[in-house]
Amino acid sequence: MSRALARSAASSGRLPATTAVRAVSTTPALRESSSTYESPFKGQPKNKVPDFSKYMAKRPPSSNALFSYFMVGTLGAISAAGAKSTIQEFLVNMSASADVLAMAKVEVDLNAIPEGKNVIIKWRGKPVFIRHRTPAEIEEANSVNVASLRDPQADADRVKKPEWLVMLGVCTHLGCVPIGEAGDFGGWFCPCHGSHYDISGRIRKGPAPLNLEVPTYDFTDDGKLVVG
Amino acid sequence: MASALYNALFRRNVTMLGVVFASAFAFELGFNNLMNKIWDNHNRGRQWKDIRHKYIQDGDDE
């Protein structure tokens, strides 16, 4: 800026006829008008590069580079560990805690349930019906025309072993607990609004829209049932 | 010595990244171990693993 001002002042002194705009501008035309370029900084000493040798490292450059990159790498490593730990803790925080996991599974000894009997157990705060069905009941469940049902589902899709029927004891209408061995179809009957379920837990009559829900369960080798 | 280390670890970007991640892994292991030791030492005798033997005889699991 100061150089441009100085140049414009010098040129305007030499060429008074030029306009103010011309004087301020630094176009090549203006530079051509003055035949030789003169530095405005006259009488000042040339720049001298100071002697930095006092500040130079005594060690060889490679060890300097090694130290710098070591510090950079250390910072990177610590940041990476911190970032990984942060994300991991967030994710671990979301997973189920030990008490929830302990409640998630229920084990039942099936040998204690005689044929033709219902057992109600509590699983995750909800009742679960387990029925040891007789061959006649299995026959009855399979003889139903699936297409005629409100929620068409074959009996084979609802059980893993035909003699064991396992399902959630929550009426699909409004969540009451149906009564076992009752109703028009020999299965379950919900006293709240009169839904009738058959021996496979399928809705046959009443307001409920769906069959009784089947939880995930498995049979162990030693005659036990694990729900969950 | 220094230049050999520099050439081995930091000369190429890829190797530097690998070294950084590997050292991050090692650092995390050591740091977690150290912090767990400090914590256990601070709470000595108050944690379940310290008093478990008083309540549970080994042999039958749980």
Image (cartoon, rainbow, N blue to C red):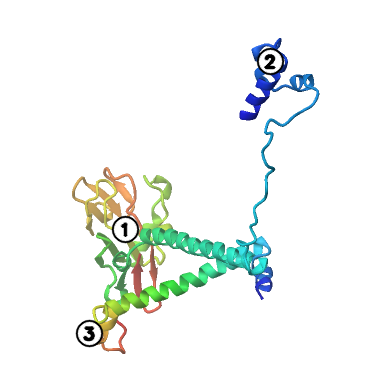
Subunit of mark 2? Answer: A
Q: Is the same chain shared between marks 3 and 1?
A: no
Q: Position of residue A220 (x, y in %)?
A: 39, 74
Q: Are there few (<14), some (14-19), or many (20+) residues within 10 Å of tag 1?
A: many
Q: Are there few (<14), some (14-19), or many (20+) residues within 10 Å of tag 2?
A: some
Q: Quadrant of residue A226?
A: bottom left
Write down the residue under mark 1.
Answer: A199
Q: Is residue A41 left or right of residue A171?
A: right
Q: Nearer the viewer, mark 2 or mark 1?
A: 2
- A68 or A180, which is in the foreground? A68
- The answer to whether the residue labelled 3 contacts the one labelled 1, judged by CB atoms less than 8 Å apart, is no
Q: Is the same chain shared between marks 2 and 3?
A: no
Q: Earlier in the sequence, mark 2 or mark 1?
A: 2
Subunit of mark 1? Answer: A
Q: Could you tell me which residue is drawn at 22 percent across and 51 percent down? A: A176
- The answer to whether the residue labelled 2 contacts the one labelled 1, judged by CB atoms less than 8 Å apart, is no
- The circle drawn on residue B55 is 3
Q: Position of residue A81 (x, y in %)?
A: 48, 64
Write down the residue under mark 2.
Answer: A22
Q: Position of residue A53 (x, y in %)?
A: 65, 61
Q: Is residue A70 left or right of residue A61?
A: left
Residue A69 seen in the figure: yes
- A11 or A98, which is in the foreground? A11
Q: Could you tell me which residue is drawn at 28 percent across and 67 percent down? A: A99
Quarter of the image with the N terminus of chain A in it: top right
Q: How many marks?
A: 3
Q: Nearer the viewer, mark 3 or mark 1?
A: 3
Subunit of mark 3? Answer: B
Whole-angstrom CA distance, mark 2 to mark 1, is 104 Å
Q: Quadrant of residue A155?
A: bottom left
Q: Position of residue B55 (x, y in %)?
A: 22, 85
- The circle drawn on residue B62 is none
